[in-house]
Amino acid sequence: MDTRVKPAYDGKQTCRRLRQKSMQITLTTWNVNSVRLRIDLVAKFLKAQRPDVLCLQETKCPDDAFPLKRFRRLGYEHVALNGQKGYHGVAVVSKLPFDASNIRTFCDKIDSRHVGVTLGGEAGLAAPLVLHNFYVPAGGDIPDPALNPKFAHKLQFLDEMKACTPLHPRDGDRHVLVGDLNVAPHEHDVWSHKQLLKIVSHTPVECEKLLGLQSHGNWVDIARARIPMSEKVYTWWSYRAADWVAANRGRRLDHIWVSEALRGGIRDFRITRAARGWERPSDHVPVTAVIEV
């Protein structure tokens, strides 16, 4: 006869252990170019794609004006904000709760270009997943830091990202870095490598700095891990084109990177190109990755 006392069944603990074995997270990054102006387009995307986490850039509104109620009705109850009136601004909206959130500043400017969150036990993860959402300065039109303070700011921002220790995952760390990084670093990340070498976003100095940041942190660029370097990949098409589809002069400015520890967990990657053709669209489109964590 077995006289050992068996522990009482704890449904919550059992469910938590099951959830923590492994799960897939679908994550989207999108420079929405005004979240209030395009909230209906955001809702359209969320209803169709249902990512677990949506990272927005260029929200262009202060935190107290962010459309929280609309996101909550869509099922995204957890929000981390770093906004400002009329310019810049980043946000993370999520179906999964955060364990923590943080904001970092760069170049001694308070201009709302970063927000970070940690997903952990509250989201049912066995180990923390750290997410950084960035909006890197565009850099203006003149690719000379001596003549263009905006370009100088961009280069300094990239340098400070490289020098920022928390952006360099250690062995085993599960980190994701996303956002509008405003650099198309590879030859086939732009419609014409030769014609854009002197155009801001694809100049050699910008590409060198972004790729230096990537290699310094041992980051994996999911797009180029899934798509051959020989294939053209774009996430942005200028408003200046009369017919953006016919011209197809795009650039890959929006990125999802993961730490080496997550490389084996990459399950899918997609660019919602159709969003560029929606009514009153952003010039950027949503970029989505599915990662097993």
Image (cartoon, rainbow, N blue to C red):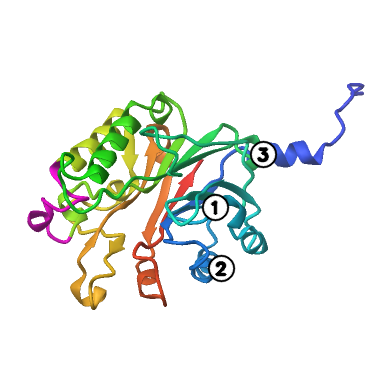
Q: Is residue 90 above or below residue 233?
A: above
Q: Is residue 62 left or right of residue 234?
A: right
Q: Nearer the viewer, residue 225 or 7?
A: 225
Q: CA distance from mark 2 to mark 3?
A: 24 Å
Please give the label number shown on residue 62.
Answer: 1
1 or 3: mark nearer the eye = 1
- Does the magenta segment cover residue 201? yes
* Residue stretch rendered in magenta on the structure: 191-204
Q: CA distance from mark 1 to mark 3?
A: 27 Å
Instruction: Assign the magenta stretch its main secondary structure.
Output: loop
Residue 208 in the image: state x and y as whole percent.
Answer: 18, 37
Give SS at disc 3: helix
Circle 2 residue:
47
The three-letter amino acid code for the residue at tag 3 is: Glu
Please give the label number shown on residue 122.
Answer: 3
Query: Label 1 neighbourhood size at 10 Å, few (<14), some (14-19), many (20+)?
Result: some
